[in-house]
Image (spheres, rainbow, N blue to C red):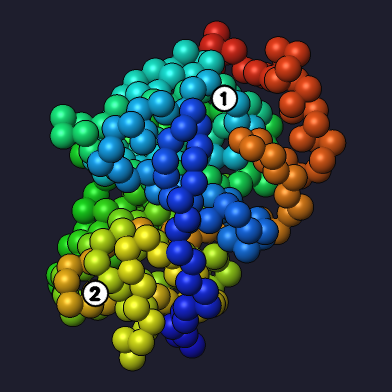
Amino acid sequence: MDEMRKVSRIVRSQPTLEGAGVHLKRVFGFREPRDFDPFLLLDDFRSDTPAYYLKGFPWHPHRGIETITYILEGQVEHSDSLGNAGVIGPGDVQWMTAGSGIIHQEMPLGDSAGRMGGFQLWANLPAAHKMMEPRYRDVKSMQIPLVQTDGGAAIRVISGEVDGVKGPVQDIITDPAYLDVSLPPGVEFTHPTNPEHTVLAYVIEGEVFFDPGRKNLIGNGELAQFDPGTYLAASAAERPARFILLSGQPIGEPVAWYGPIVMNTQRELEVAFEEYRNGAFIKYKKENKKE
């Protein structure tokens, strides 16, 4: 029997500083990791002030997670310990699986008007895959399909599926969906969801109702978390609205987390930082990196 997901919690993003002094809004990442399993953290780094983002995120390690960066405005330059380097711009996605360990830097550049906009999501990896070989999936904007519904909704499908159209990022362990949904006023969008998955919606423009009675109004910079159900319903208020829809299979394992490294036990965490200090953190070198 179909059951609509109801909003169980509304979370307001909070200003914070990260990296070398980047001003951003943290949507979640403060609370108990199990609350959003398999997701760990979501940062909103939209800004019109270059001084707030240009210091960027200099060289730092990651292990045990995936980082997903989605750009709306401006550009981000990146490079890493495997020899990868490049720039992602508006509409592009970088899906990085840190696995056993990678050291990288991300430096926001903005655009000609000084604008920088985007989001970074951290997704956990299960114990069996935490030490897997690192990999990148750089997805250009033109590779991301746009689905237009009969009602007028427009959905960019980064991962997951909408109306039989699959996103370019596939074969991810936690089976995530990452959708960018745009809604004209009054248009309802419904989307089937796996009842066992965690489902989150982060509003990035306008205001959205996630109930037929149009009582729960979620605004720009707010996240809705949902109770279990087989589908989600959303409609814009009086103005056009846009939100990011995330879903994924919970892992249900213990989490030991400090900074950019997420493992299952405190001892594994200690080993990771010991290896980082001793120069033994990187397990896969450029010469044996899969192309």
**What residue is shown at x 45% (from left), y 64% (from top)?**
12
Q: Which mark is residue 268?
A: none
**What residue is shown at x 65% (from left), y 56% (from top)?**
33
Q: Residue furthest top?
A: 287
Q: Quadrant of the C terminus?
A: top left
Q: Percent from the top left, x then y, of residue 104?
A: 51, 23
> Is residue 85 visible from the viewing direction of this image?
yes
> Is residue 99 visible from the viewing direction of this image?
no
Residue corresponding to mark 1: 60
Residue corresponding to mark 2: 236
Q: Percent from the top left, x then y, of residue 57?
A: 47, 28
Which structural element holds mark 1? strand
Q: Percent from the top left, x then y, of residue 92?
A: 29, 38
180 displayed left or right of 21: left
> Dot 2, crowdedness within 10 Å: few (<14), some or many (≥20)?
many
- Judging depth in this view, the residue of 2 and 224 nearest the camera is 224
Q: Percent from the top left, x then y, of residue 42?
A: 48, 50
> Dot 1, crowdedness within 10 Å: few (<14), some or many (≥20)?
some
Instruction: Choose top left, top right, bottom left or bottom right for residue 245.
Output: bottom left
Q: Is residue 60 above or below residue 184?
A: above
**What residue is shown at x 66% (from left), y 28% (from top)?**
100
Q: Is residue 137 above or below residue 213?
A: above
**What residue is shown at x 28% (from left), y 38% (from top)?**
49
- Amino acid on which disc 2 is placed: Ala
Q: Is residue 162 above or below residue 254?
A: below
Q: Earlier in the sequence, mark 1 or mark 2?
A: 1
Find the distance from the CA under tag 1 to the CA under tag 2: 39 Å
- Amino acid on which disc 1 is placed: His
- Judging depth in this view, the residue of 205 and 113 nearest the camera is 113
Which structural element holds mark 2? strand
